Amino acid sequence: LPRGKYLAIVADRLMLAHTWDVSGGTKSRRIWWSARGNPASFPTPGTISAAEVESDYQDLEGGGDLMGILPSIGGADAAVFGESRIWTLYDIGPPAFFQIDAKEQGRGASVPGSIVQVGNVAFYWSREGVFVFDGASSTPIGGDKVNNYLLGDFDESKKRLVWAAQDLRRNLVMWAYPSGANQSVANQSVADKMLVYNWKTGNFSFVELNVQALHAVETRGLTLEELDAYG
C-alpha cells in the first residue's frame, strides 16, 4: 500500500498527499486516493480495477512540495497546500474523478504544522505571514506588526515543532512554535512560544510557554460569516 505524509478523508475516500510507495519511492508532489468507500484499497493506478473503484493519483506541479490536505474547505471537497500554491478538489466522478483547480498561485503554506481547519476555512502560515483560505482565495490576517514579529522570532530550522489547533468555545486559533530564544532552553524538542488569534475580535497575542502538542477542543461547522471580520 502507498503511504502519505498527510492524510484526509475526501469524498468517501482516503486521500494521501506527499506519498511513498515501493515502486515509485517518495513523490513529494503527489496526491493518491483510495477506492471509494474502502480506505484500505489502492489498486494499481491506471488499471481497470482502479477505475472501477474510482482510485487514482495525480501529481500537482508548480507549487513545490505538498505541505498538507484538509477536507471540506469552502465549497470544495478538499484543499491541498503546496509550498507556493493551493489547490481545491471537487469530486466529479469518472473518468477524471476530481476537478483540480489552482486557487492560489505564488503563495502556499511554508510550515506544514501551521495548517489548521476551522469549520469550512483553513488558517496557515506563508512566507509573508498568517493567512486564512476560504476555498476561493486567501486573506491576510496578521498585519505588518504581527507578521514581522512572528517571522523574525520563529526558528524555521525547527519548523517540525510547530503545532496548530482551534478552540471553538473561545473563538481561538493557536500556533505553538519554536523561537530563536529556544537555543537557550534545555529541552529543545519543544516549542517555547504560542501565537493566539481570536477570530471574533481580530486580536493576536504571543505567549511564552513550552508546548509539545496541541489538540482541537471542539469541532462544529462554521461559515465565514460566523468567523466575522479578520481584522
Image: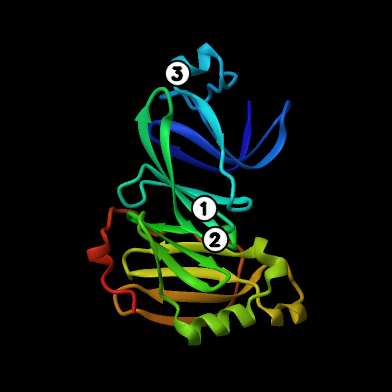
Q: Residue at x 38, y 34 (%)?
A: 11
Residue 166 at what x, y percent from top left?
41, 63
Q: Which numbered marker is on residue 81?
A: 1
The residue to which callout 2 is attached is 109
In the rendered image, the quadrant that contains the N terminus is top right
Callout 2 secondary element:
loop
Q: Amino acid at mark 1?
A: Phe
Callout 1 secondary element:
strand
Q: Amino acid at mark 3?
A: Val
Position of residue 93 in the picture relative to residue 108 (left or right): left
Task: Give the farthest residue toward the top.
Answer: 48
The residue to which callout 3 is attached is 53
Q: CA distance from mark 3 to mark 2?
A: 32 Å
Q: Residue at x 47, y 17 (%)?
A: 51
The reply to whether callout 1 and callout 3 are in contact (CB within 8 Å) is no
In front: 31, or 122?
31
